[in-house]
Image (cartoon, rainbow, N blue to C red):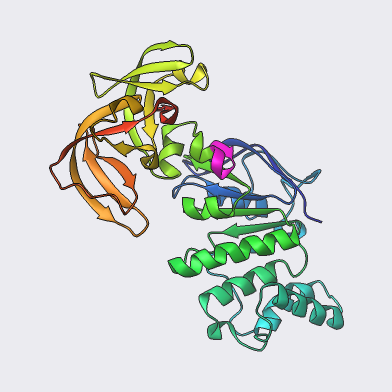
Amino acid sequence: MSQRVVLRNVAKSFGSVVALKAINLEIKEGEFITLLGPSGCGKTTTLRLIAGFNEPDQGQIFLGDEDITNLPPQKREIGMVFQDYALFPHLTVKENIAFPLRERRTPKEDIDSRVEELLELVRLAGVEQRYPSELSGGQAQRISVARAVAYPPRVLLMDEPLGALDLKLREVMQAELRRIQQELQITTVFVTHDQTEAMNMSDRIAVMRNGEIEQVGTAREIYNFPRSAFVADFVGRINLLDAKLSSKSEGIAELNILNYMKIRAKMTTEEELTSGPLCVGIRPEKLVIGVSGQESEFDNRIPGTVIRYSFSGNLVNVFVDVGADRPFLVEQRPDHTPLNSGTKTEVCWNAPDTLVLSAK
């Protein structure tokens, strides 16, 4: 029943505000894909266009091989989970889950067995006679999912469904939602602005910005090989510096940073060094605070001064002033001896860990 979703040159404006700029996206059958980006990037608009709540100004939307661009929402067979869950407060849990089945005149015995099956799926057997006001946030979340899939949809859409939960419960629900999606093998489009949530749950992530899709890929691809400074900065933590190409030879590029200093980077493509303004990015976990006697171990070393450090359990975050607009962040293990503020040091890393990025 689950089907792929294809958006071809889909654009949408609201008056003078351009929400989407002719995006193209193919979501595979049974895939869990997340639309990730800041507020106003177009991710919820994309979701609402797939659901049929809005119509595109141009382009086509396909569900399987069917063009659903102008099909009303009730005929698309799409399940929807909202941020506020949208459960009916006057109905019991059982009645909430059964609602879409009753709307389709499903026989009562089939409704009862389906509700029982779904309560087992979401691990809430025994709460069918409770009302939404008697449920915790995580329980209400799971009941909302159960109702959305009661009549098996072709696609499940989820609009920031974990936003109202506390951190610990969000982490639990990420695993639960992923489990449910995989058991049902249902094509799922998930919207969030939380990059950790996206990376934990998704088969693929579509990073959006200003109504456009900047990059689509797995969490590992987007984190390790971002195509722009925006993607690198939005997905994970990174140190960014403007850069100018100085030379390139045998797969190694030499770049100027901080007006005078040269660093080395391993090139992945020629295009990345010839397509406009550049910057370089280095993930904090790739950096090392310089130690005397290890000078030959690293391709790149830049001097700096420790500003401060913070302890966060499994990591110590060291902030080093290297003369850039913002301090460099270095992640260390907690058993490393912390450096005092004002300590002169060096920040070191190797050429393969230098990401050369579009600065656009």
The question of residue 217 being in magenta is answered with yes
Please, is residue 290 above or below residue 315 in the view? above
Q: Residue 290 lies in what quarter of the image?
A: top left
Quarter of the image with the N terminus in it? bottom right
For this view, does 1 lie left or right of residue 88?
right
Residue 320 point in image, percent of width and height: 23, 40
Please, is residue 277 above or below residue 83 in the view? above
For this view, does 3 lie left or right of residue 309?
right
- Taking the spot 51% from the left edge, 55% from the top edge, the residue there is 197
Q: Residue furthest left?
A: 342
| 208 vs 52, nearest the viewer | 208
For this view, does 305 lie left or right of residue 76?
left
| 197 vs 3, nearest the viewer | 197
| 336 vs 91, nearest the viewer | 336
- Taking the spot 52% from the left edge, 39% from the top edge, the residue there is 222
| 250 vs 97, nearest the viewer | 250
Residue 104 point in image, percent of width and height: 81, 71
- Taking the spot 78% from the left edge, 74% from the top edge, the residue there is 101
Residue 48 point in image, percent of width and height: 61, 53
Residue 317 seen: yes
The question of residue 24 being in magenta is answered with no
Quarter of the image with the C terminus in it? top left
Residue 81 seen: no
- Taking the spot 48% from the left edge, 46% from the top edge, the residue there is 37
The range drawn in magenta is: 212-221
